[in-house]
Amino acid sequence: MPLKDSRARAEEALRLRARRKTWTEISAELGFRSRDGARLAVNRLLKSVSADPGHVALERAVSSASLAAQEPGLFELYEAAVKRGDDEAAATLSRELRSLVTDRAKLAGLYAPQAVSVDVKLSLGDLIAQAKQRLLALDNTVDAEVIE
């Protein structure tokens, strides 16, 4: 089988796995010789696009594909609820859609914590000098002397 066709078949196997089909069902539907062949094809596909270990990449890809498959259906239900004027259903579906987007962002690593350094070592004199600089930088501050 040409590389392009085998890649497309592996991508379809991943989509079917995201729909919670078993490896046996996937292999029967797509013509793999065994369930292990289907699983191996998906693992190879994921190795080619991800540096994560196989099982982590597989779970992430399956979860992401599953969420992506749910999103269009939920959006159609949301639009229908808005057209009907069913505010309660629309609000519920909106929250669920937001949750799907958030979960997909987390899977993509967008919620990964970042190290931030908050170590401040200033003397009292330095703090006063900085405060004075900031106050003088404001446009509404007037620096003047009172002459009597």
Image (cartoon, rainbow, N blue to C red):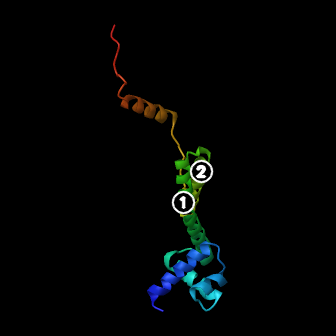
Of mark 1 and mark 2, the one earlier in the sequence is 2
Label 2's element? helix
- Identity, as a three-letter code, of the amino acid under mark 2: Arg
Instruction: Identify the residue at horizontal 55%, vertical 48% (top origin).
Output: 84
Where's residue 48, x and y in %? 50, 80
Where's residue 129, x and y in %? 44, 32
Q: How many angstroms separate mark 1 from mark 2 (CA)?
A: 15 Å
Labelled disc at residue 105? 1
Residue 70 in sight: yes
Where's residue 142, x and y in %? 35, 22
- Identity, as a three-letter code, of the amino acid under mark 1: Ala
Up-down relation of residue 147 to residue 7 (above or below): above
Q: Are marks 1 and 2 in contact (CB under 8 Å)?
A: no
Q: Report which residue position mark 2 lands on.
A: 95
Residue at the extreme top of the image, as rendered: 148
Left or right of 88? Residue 123 is: left
Instruction: Identify the residue at horizontal 36%, vertical 25% (top origin).
Output: 140
Q: Nearer the viewer, mark 1 or mark 2?
A: 2
Name the residue nearer the viewer: 89 or 51. 89
Up-down relation of residue 47 to residue 116 (above or below): below
Instruction: Identify the residue at horizontal 54%, vertical 47% (top origin).
Output: 119
Q: Is the residue marked by circle 2 packed among few (<14), some (14-19), or many (20+) residues within 10 Å?
A: few
